[in-house]
Amino acid sequence: MSAQPIIWQTLAQDEGARAGILRTRRATIETPVFMPVGTLGSVKGVRFEALETELDARIILANTYHLYLRPGVELIRACGGLHRFIGWERAMLTDSGGFQVWSLSGLRRVTEEGVEFRSHIDGSQCFLSPEIAMEAQAALGAEIVMAFDECPPGKSSLEEARRSMELTLRWAQRSRRRFLELQREGADAGRTQEQDLLSGAQAQFGIVQGAIHLDLRRESLARTVEIGFEGYALGGLSVGEEKGAMYEVLAEIAPLMPADRPRYLMGVGTPEDLLEAVAHGIDMFDCVLPTRTARNGLAWTSRGRLNVKNARWARDTKPLDEECACAVCRRHSRAYLRHLYLAGEMLAAILLTHHNLFFFLDTMRRVRQSIRSGCFSRFRQEFLERFNAGLD
Ligand SMILES: N#Cc1ccc(CCNc2nc3cc4nc(N)[nH]c(=O)c4cc3[nH]2)cc1
């Protein structure tokens, strides 16, 4: 039995924004959705029970590049796949590794075949190709897997962006071919219904590149759709380009992405960026912002950014965000969080991470509500007015 495909349906359209439902074997995901990043199989600083209960995260992202290097995908397969290995029972998406090789490993050599690189962990010689990236993701077992692509720098010239886009398209064809072969092999393996429920990707997403060059972006989208995927991602953004250029790509390209498939913006972003992208019809997001900045003392609030390191909060007994309903804001003060952070207490990162994820996930819940009520534009305006008003 081949893995059942994901089921995508649009529930409401509000100007350019849309609200939908993505049904995978393990979770019903309401969109627009923010995916917490669990690079190495953990969302740093937060337990899965909290992610499932108070935070109600339905899908998280993991990175093939990192898990391929450590502990290795064969070990994870031998332990029953990534969901079982880490104890996460809802949905997962795995990024394919191309971007992480580019952003993490120093020495790397890109050839037609794939990417040779040195592990950022022990410097050993490694190699990833579209085929290896698909086989690695099959071993991990996420419901949604990403094609293997190359992400050019955000300010690439037209020539560099075209060269990279053409390579990504050839790798997209190889990724798709290997994905379909693996699906057939899995089906031919005579998986029982139960096994099918536990393994086998339900969807592979293609990744649109082209940097900030709109003609390239339109060509990349058309040729990626021609290959045919269950969903489509905008890659190559939030990688050093001007924010205005990213917004221009969103405005021009997102509405052209197939309306009957999920639209995923990779690696983005701040609350302002999320609202901008939702306005142009993006459904899925992932970003390390809420988790990584928490470990550096930053809280995201309805009144903007609050860094607990600031002496301004030393005696402030108010919660991080007076309008936040999370467990951290119900119990703790800015003064206490500042004390924990300055004392180097690990609880500082844990509490700030919990609050930040609650803020991002709850904001997306309110976004979905506003789209389904036909008032997203007003919600977005009011949200940004308060967010940019700053803290009194
Ligand atoms: N704190 C913090 C923080 C650190 C980095 C970032 C930028 C993340 N941007 C980003 N992730 C990406 C992943 C990607 N994956 C793939 N396979 N392809 C991409 O083009 C791609 C592009 C991305 N752009 C955003 C916030």
Image: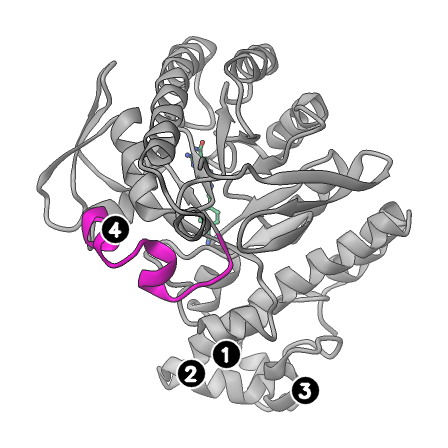
Q: CA distance from mark 2 to mark 3?
A: 18 Å
Question: What secondary structure is marked by label 2?
Answer: helix
Query: Which residue position is annotated with label 2?
Result: 347
**Residue behind mark 3:** 318
* Residue at mark 1 to residue at mark 3: CA–CA distance: 15 Å
Name the secondary structure under disc 4: helix
In the image, which disc is placed on residue 77?
4
User: Is residue 329 depicted above or below 133 in this figure?
Assistant: below
Q: Which residues are magenta?
A: 72-91
Q: Is residue 73 magenta?
A: yes
Q: Which residue is mark 1?
A: 351
- Mark 2 vs mark 4, foreground winner is 4
- Callout 3 amino acid: Lys
User: Which callout, 1 or 3, points to the residue nearer the camera?
Assistant: 1
Q: Secondary structure at mark 1?
A: helix
Residue type (three-letter) at the residue carrying disc 4 = Arg
